[in-house]
Amino acid sequence: MNLVNFKHDTDADGILTLVWDMPGKPMNVLDQSLMDELNAIVDHVIADAAIKGVVLTSGKDAFCAGADLTMMEGAAKEFAEAVKARGEEAAMKEFAAQAGRGSQVFRRIETCGKPWAAAINGVALGGGFEIALSCHYRVIADNAKAQVGLPEVKVGLFPGAGGTQRIPRLMATPDALQFLFKGDSWKPAKAKQMNLVHEVAPEAEIVSRAKAWIKGGGKAVAPWDDKNFKSPSGKIFSPMGMMIWPPANAIYRKETFDNYPAVKAILKCVYEGLQVPFDTALKIETRYFAQIMRSKEAAAMIRSLFLSMGDLNKGARRPAGEPAKLKKIAVVGAGFMGAGIAYVSANAGLDVILLDREIELAEKGKAYSHKLISDQIMKGRAKTADRDALLARITTTADYAALADVDLVIEAVFEDPAVKADVIKKVSAAIRPDCVFASNTSTLPITGLAEHAAKPEQFIGIHFFSPVEKMLLVEIILAKQTKDKAILAAFDYVRAINKTPIIVNDGRGFFANRCVGNYILEGHLMLTEGVPPAMIENAAKMAGMPVGPLSLNDEVAIDLGLKIAKATEAQVGAGAVNPAQKALLVGMVETHGRLGRKNKKGFYDYPDQGPKRLWPGLKEFQTTKLDPDSIDVNELKQRFLVTQALEAARSVEEGIVTDPREADVGSIIGFGFAPFTGGVLSYIDFMGAKKFVALCEKLAAKHGKRFEPNALLRDMAAKGDGFYQRYAPVKQAA
């Protein structure tokens, strides 16, 4: 065989070993060339009587990362062109055939009459795991990197090469649905427990174990091809089935609010597929897969959560330059944010100086790292030695002289201009001339803070989101004076701690907090309008947000919101803050002492026992109460999404955001903007600027000037273009 993507060898026992090793790629992926070669290999295996079986393994660290999603993005464009050239019906037939190619090839492996065994040496995700599932036997390496999963749902797709049919025939239907819905990946032990692999073995032995199974008489028949096969959960229309499917549909509705077509397609594929023969079930899966591949949700999520995020993480916005030399950093301020920054930095292998005004406060901040790593140990994700090593990398102090030899300082003190100015001056006097200085401020303009630094050109914003250890986004904010040296240091630091950076220009609230602020504001105003608090929270989640605005405000602290409001008024003017919102914040904080989750009293009460519940006293802030039946829930949903998208459009117009990828990726991973839309700017683009402007005008007429579309949007609507047309991203990575 003349193969490009596989190395191959047939041993004396007639076992063909295929080593999957795609040239020029860091990981194996599924693409058209791979499918062509696999198809040819199956032909060869069938034709060659000397071949008794096949072992499929990988020559790379991972088994397979899944399908090449750039190929899928191109498929949508090809379909549109085919419709124009040959009509909808002919184009759809071609598209469906293309969508089902993988499924057909994998089924040929399964039914070729000779046993195939997969020796999984590392990560096997998506289509890579679907190949393994089509093999009759699966051995996985017992190592830390090995895992299997079908994460396609996270980018708006679902497993379309047999995954929705093989998984529910290998495990109980409820477990199968959860696995497919969540897109989780499982370690070897869990995978074996759930019947997804047959054997866990040392990595050095996985190929020999696979061969041993073949030589021991391994059957070339999948369980579902056995005439006596029965589904693990029995028939759909049975007492057991009736206990599974109504709750499954309810769970789907509760978790997705019908916003994710791929999840609904999974439900349909499993439900319909378990009622018919396996080959028919695969055809059903392909039909739904072709539909989902053409959905705007899939297009939006693939673009933002796979392609754009990949571009940003690879350095698409990084200035050209040598990697920053960062060995030792300092965090000034050991509160909740500072403690989190210290933890993620030490966890990435950096030495950390954690400084606060009193050593006891610094030690308290270090204790947070102890708690987090101890939690990891309890979950089996870390060892005691890992904790000892991490804590040894964090040195606490109250002495600014300890900053003399650090490469990067991150200031994380109170959100007070005077406090920050004082700290910046003290740090500037203590650090080396070449040290880069960053501020973790949430809203204060970086340019103003830089004026207090000894070297403003080396001053930059590095804005984390709370909780630091969980949130993936970091905003890098450029002051007017900031030079490339600081940008390179900030960017390389963010990637070193495994976060996704977006680079934005300076302005109050930068990008993310402006959008989040609008989201919370809209929730506040709905409350003062008389909308029931529970309806506010539920409408937000129905719109696609992870938590309601009132709950979110509790998490970030209500008193912080009031401090920011007062600081904004002091620096910008009395009209800078909505008076209804300010009155609400003052009432909550100063009258009732309700600060949020941190003191267990916010928009919600947080009892020691039991779940949180909305505070009954919120009725005090509702001079009028609207009849819930009279409220247009769809309009509430629109208000939540439009107010954030509109603020994002303003940030583009003002030059805060210069790359639409950063706005979209940042909005999803930074504050959870409805992922199925592809992000704040994709929400506008997929709706169309003309339609979005019309919606803004409708909302403005009813709810005020805050919904009026800006000049940029009106111009885009008139010219029929979008953000990804007008601000086409530069694709090359540094």
Image: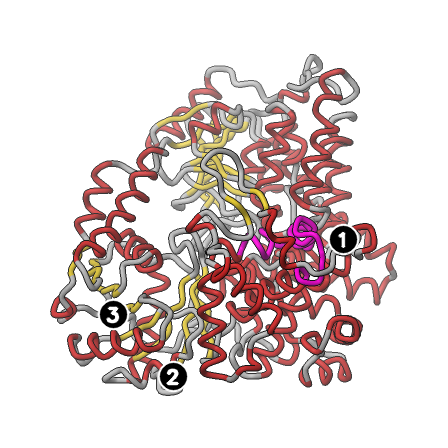
For residue 292, above or below residue 527: above
Instruction: Report the span colored magenta.
Output: 526-552
Q: Classify residue 240 as left or right of residue 15.
A: right
How far from the left and from the top, in percent, is residue 67? 57, 49
Q: CA distance from mark 1 to mark 3?
A: 52 Å
Q: Classify residue 14 as left or right of residue 277.
A: left
How far from the left and from the top, in percent, is residue 629? 82, 50
For residue 103, above or below residue 442: above
Q: Main secondary structure of the magenta part?
A: helix
Q: Which mark is residue 95?
A: 1
Q: CA distance from mark 1 to mark 2?
A: 52 Å
Quickly name the residue at label 2: 447
Q: Which mark is residue 119?
A: none
How far from the left and from the top, in percent, is residue 25? 45, 56
- Assess whether residue 309 is covered by the magenta stretch: no
Residue type beneath disc 1: Phe
Front residue of 728/25: it is: 728
Q: Classify residue 536 as left or right of residue 217.
A: right
Quickly name the residue at label 3: 408
Residues tagged 1 and 3 counted as in contact (Cβ below 8 A): no
- Assess whether residue 532 is covered by the magenta stretch: yes
Residue 170 image-quadrant placement: top right
Please name the residue shown 22% across and 60% down the image: 354
Residue 272 image-quadrant placement: top right
Q: CA distance from mark 2 to mark 3?
A: 18 Å
Q: Earlier in the sequence, mark 1 or mark 3?
A: 1
